[in-house]
Image (cartoon, rainbow, N blue to C red):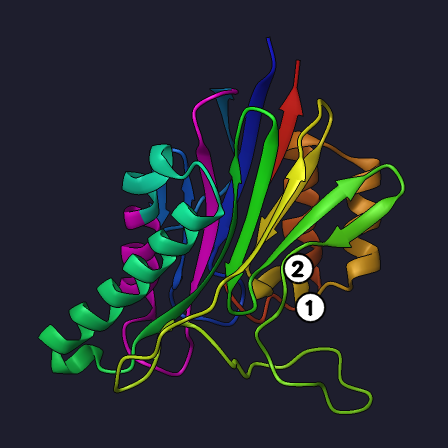
């Protein structure tokens, strides 16, 4: 019987004082805390399973509050996410929830978060994102980014930017979001990497792909985290590796 493993890790990095990332895998959430080693969960294939990373917007209040709110909302809605329209509606609810929470507490005004993830269905996978957290498909022939960064064009010679053109929350007045959504067939052996930019900013995509070719499961997640730390660990590092087994 086909099954899924989700191996996840969330770490503060070497520079930030606390972790503003959150993660959801099915009913399991990890909010603003640190895992010292990769955690692996196993799920049957069938009921929609959501795996997502939310990265609270740095430099604005309540990043950890916004990211936690979003992953908990997705955990509750996960089993109902049977198609693109359901995911679109869920992300709209998440966006409205972040704004509503900010309105109730002046100290949380302008809090916001990115989100990126995948809903694994019985025969397909639905990838979604708002912001610059990323989802990659990892296959034998290399790494392919499936998500779409919501960030302005890069200056010549620049590989990364902290600027966002879209997020859940993040402004004083409500702003609707247009999530990026794509659906692909699902096969045994498929792997998807969901991560915050605490991994992809310091670690080039070619290195991420190389590590995923060499390793799988917990070892792959550990080596990716280690690469980000060795590159300076400038931001919170959160990642989940989804693998379809049989």
Residue extending farthest top: 1
Asked if 171 appears above or below 178 in the picture, the reply is below
Q: Which element type, helix, strand or loop, lies under badge 2?
A: helix
Q: In which quadrant is the C terminus drawn? A: top right
Whether tag 2 and tag 1 are in contact, CB under 8 A, the answer is: yes
Q: Is residue 96 left or right of residue 84?
A: left
Mark 1 residue crowding within 10 angstroms, few (<14) / some (14–19) / many (20+): some
Residue 21 picture location, percent across and down? 42, 59
Q: Check residue 63 for magenta coloring.
A: yes
Q: Residue at x 73, y 63 (%)?
A: 203
Tell me: residue 195, above or below residue 123.
Answer: below
Asked if residue 238 can be seen in this view, the reply is: no
Q: Which circle's residue, 2 or 1, is located before the other in the chain?
A: 1
Does residue 154 lie above or below 19 as drawn? below
Mark 2 residue crowding within 10 angstroms, few (<14) / some (14–19) / many (20+): many
- Distance in Å between CA atoms under marks 2 and 1: 6 Å
User: In terms of depth relative to the viewer, which is nearer, 107 or 90?
Assistant: 90
Q: Which residues are magenta?
A: 45-73
* Residue on which the image places disc 1: 202
Name the residue tied to disc 2. 228
Q: Residue furthest bottom?
A: 155
For the point 43% across and 72% down, the residue is: 167
**Which quadrant is home to the N terminus?**
top right
Q: How many marks?
A: 2
Quadrant assignment, res 155: bottom right
* Element type at mark 1: loop
Residue 195 rendering spot, x and y as whole percentages: 57, 54
Residue at x 59%, y 37% (from the top left corner) = 125
């Amino acid at each position: 019987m086909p099954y899924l493993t989700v191996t996840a890790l969330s770490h503060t990095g070497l520079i930030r004082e606390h972790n503003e990332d959150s993660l959801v895998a099915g009913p399991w959430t990890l909010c603003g805390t640190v895992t010292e080693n990769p955690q692996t969960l196993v799920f049957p294939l069938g009921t929609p399973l959501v795996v997502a990373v939310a990265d609270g917007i740095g430099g604005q209040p309540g990043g950890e509050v916004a990211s936690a709110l979003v992953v908990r909302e997705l955990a509750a809605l996960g089993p109902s996410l049977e198609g693109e329209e359901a995911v679109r509606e869920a992300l709209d609810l998440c966006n409205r929830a972040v704004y509503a929470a900010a309105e109730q507490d002046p100290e949380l005004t302008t809090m916001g978060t990115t989100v990126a993830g995948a809903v694994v269905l019985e025969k397909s996978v639905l990838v979604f994102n708002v912001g610059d957290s990323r989802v990659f498909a990892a296959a034998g022939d290399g790494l392919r980014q499936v998500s779409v960064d919501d960030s302005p064009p890069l200056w010549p010679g620049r590989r990364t930017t902290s600027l966002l053109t879209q997020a859940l929350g993040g402004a004083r007045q409500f702003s609707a979001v247009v999530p990026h959504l794509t659906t692909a067939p699902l096969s045994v052996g498929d792997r998807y990497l969901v991560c915050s930019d605490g991994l992809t900013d310091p670690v080039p995509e070619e290195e991420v792909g190389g590590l995923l070719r060499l390793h799988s499961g917990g070892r792959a997640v550990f080596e990716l985290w280690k690469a980000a730390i060795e590159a300076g660990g400038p931001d919170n590092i959160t990642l989940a590796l989804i693998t379809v087994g049989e």
